[in-house]
Image (spheres, rainbow, N blue to C red):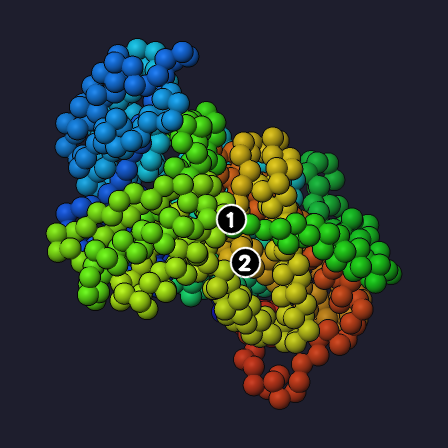
Amino acid sequence: MATFLYKLGRLAFRRRHFVALIWVALLTLAGVGAASAPAPGTTSFSIPGTEAQKAFDLLEQRFPGASADGGTGRIVFKAPEGEKMTDADNKAIVAKTTKELSDGSEVVSVTDPFTTNAVSEDGTVAYTSVKYDVPGMELADTTRDALEAAGDDARAAGLTVDIGGDALQAAAEPGAAGEIVGLALAAVVLVITLGSLVAAGLPLLTAIIGVGIGVSTITALANALDLGDTTSTLALMIGLAVGIDYALFIVSRYRGELADGRDREEAAGRATGTAGSAVVFAGLTVVIALAGLAVVNVPMLTKMGLAAAGTVVVAVLIALTMIPALLGYAGRTIRPAGEKRTSRKKKSEKSDNAEKPQAAAKAGLGTRWAHFVIRRPAAVLLLGVVGLGAIAVPVTQLELGLPDEGSQPTSTTQRRAYDLLSEGFGPGFNGPLMIVVDAEKSDDPKAAVATVTDGIKGLKDVVTVTPAAFNKAGDTATITVIPNSKPSSAQTEDLVHAIRDEGAGIKADTGAEVLVTGTTAMNIDFSQKLNDALIPYLGLVVGLAFLLLIVVFRSILVPLKAALGFLLSVLAALGAVVAVFQWGWLGGLLGVEETGPIMSMMPIFMVGVVFGLAMDYEVFLVTRMREAYVHGETPAQAIVTGFRHSSRVVAAAAVIMMAVFGGFITSSEQMIKMIGFGLAIAVFFDAFVVRMAIVPAVLALLGKKAWWLPKWLDRALPNVDVEGEGLKALDSRNSDSDPDNYRELVRA
């Protein structure tokens, strides 16, 4: 591996014009494809194998033309103080509004609140429901604009009017200002770490190119592959973070090779062969974790994972090829590690170049910390484990769900409409349940449906049960149930399960099958499906990565320690997410206006993404320790050497990732905000507590046992040579046979 990447790095350095041209051409091609691609259509949300999805599919079959998947809008009216919606003037205003909405080209139906009993008991609040023939995300802009403008006349007449429903769904904006701040912080960290604007600019440039290719490709394929907006957001988030980090590790190693006296082409080859090997295996762990989301069998999640994994692959390829090419262009503007920039005494600085960095590094913070951990490994290990364990305690109170309009900021009309409905009719009106009764196999369908209706009326937490609506064939009926609790509450979930339990008995007696669907039931089933898939997914991802790390480190205990440390950091990060977004701690500081259940995909999503990123730091830090150990140092010396060479760069990489992820906290979308915070805090825990404290403490306690591997397994495993051992012989052979190997190719 190291020898191949060494040759690749030198080739890219020499043929830099060709390499740069290829990547610019790919970026241009992807950009043209994105610009010319048709606008994305509906981004269908399906959950195969769930009861809610089965009911939804049955509706499509038994109620053709009813647009079961069509978008919905809801206009909520509130009368001025001292008036009622049933007053003649207010009724006339509502009638005019519903008439204007009915004229829309994509509108299937508009209800009259005064004939559908959609007026509150005190008469102050009423609502109109609008049904469309296409999904909410597929509505034409003119249709959405018409819905938003529908209440203008009513507002002018003095009514309070707010609008909700999935018809107003729009693309989630990740927060452009936050992204810019994140990139600015990343640039500052890169300048401090690499010592020059040119060196700092290379990782930023390559990361932006990689993300540009990845996101543009996703945009170009969005319509054909039914990719949602969140897919691009995740690819952008992950691609920026790993793209900057992978390039940073290679550029940093390049400066170290220059400091050892190697010419620039050779240094580029060495950096690609050693740090590049770590990049390849770190990237593989991220790809495994993201692509593994396919085992959950939720199409949306699978597409998100595969798209982000593809962006990571692009980031790895750019780091291995474009970075060496750009190093060739940079020439002497990128200085060896530790070299001072003063113009005085340049000759003496050049002769002492190989010695000064090491002398400075020995007194560095990373080295001092490594010595401290080696002296007190048990105390450091105990403090790290107990600290993260305490932060993880809130996980025991974790409540899962999907965000609804009640979690929107109070400044949005969707949130105000949600609150008005809750005020006038009760919170359950924001999440009605749809009961589908399949009576095809029943001897008396109407009697079976009546039995279902009576059974549901007797259940706890039920406010309203509407009369059944049959299809033309008379073998299927729909019933709407209004719960007494809000959609995301545990009481509503209990009601869904109670209806399903009731339906099991009815099927045995009448032959009619009772299915519960609707947005609320779909969210409940989605959360359950993710919970059921978490353990198999964790086993698959951790198992594959464990095998991969055994090959990389040629050890059993080091990968085991890596996996356990990851679990600890993920639990602590989830605990922090619960404390902020469910309990409200520091919510005001982060712009969390409404607490509630944690997004149901958050645990499995964080397991996938954070595991890949956590293994990045494990590979970069411990590979350098393994390299020192293989080259003859004692286990304790290897730990210090690994920290001396890698701790500063790993810390910088972690700060950069935190800055990139933290930028997404500024999003107005609760889901994006939660993901950004969760990933940022997880990176902090994993990099600075697990990898910087717990890992060296465990290695110090284990000593030589940390690198133990059964002889039979050692013989069976392929030798990937991550440490670059094969470069010694290659270097010696090249220096004897090729006098141009150490020729300086780039002049200042």
Q: Quadrant of residue 697?
A: bottom right
Residue lying at the far left of the rendered structure? 472
User: 118 or 690: which is nearer to us?
Assistant: 118
Q: Secondary structure at mark 1?
A: helix
Residue 419 visible in the current orientation = yes
At 20% from the left edge and 59% from the top edge, which residue is drawn? 445
Q: Residues within 10 Å of mark 1 (few under 14, many from 20)?
A: some
At 44% from the left edge and 36% from the top edge, which residue is drawn? 427
User: 39 or 328: which is nearer to us?
Assistant: 39
Residue 223 in the image, given as x and y percentages of width and height:
25, 48
Which label was assigned to residue 687? none
Residue 199 in the image, given as x and y percentages of width and height:
57, 43
At 33% from the left edge and 44% from the top edge, which residue is drawn? 465
Which residue in the structure is indicated by mark 1?
490
Q: Is residue 346 left or right of residue 431?
A: right
Q: Amino acid at mark 2?
A: Val
Q: Is residue 493 left or right of residue 367?
A: left
Q: Secondary structure at mark 2?
A: helix
Give the mark nearest the N terminus, 2 or 1.
Answer: 1
User: 680 or 391: which is nearer to us?
Assistant: 391
Residue 110 in the image, given as x and y percentages of width and height:
21, 32
Which residue in the structure is indicated by mark 2?
607
At 17% from the left edge and 28% from the top edge, which residue is drawn? 102
User: 25 or 541: which is nearer to us?
Assistant: 541
Q: Amino acid at mark 1?
A: Ala
Q: Is residue 612 left or right of residue 150?
A: right
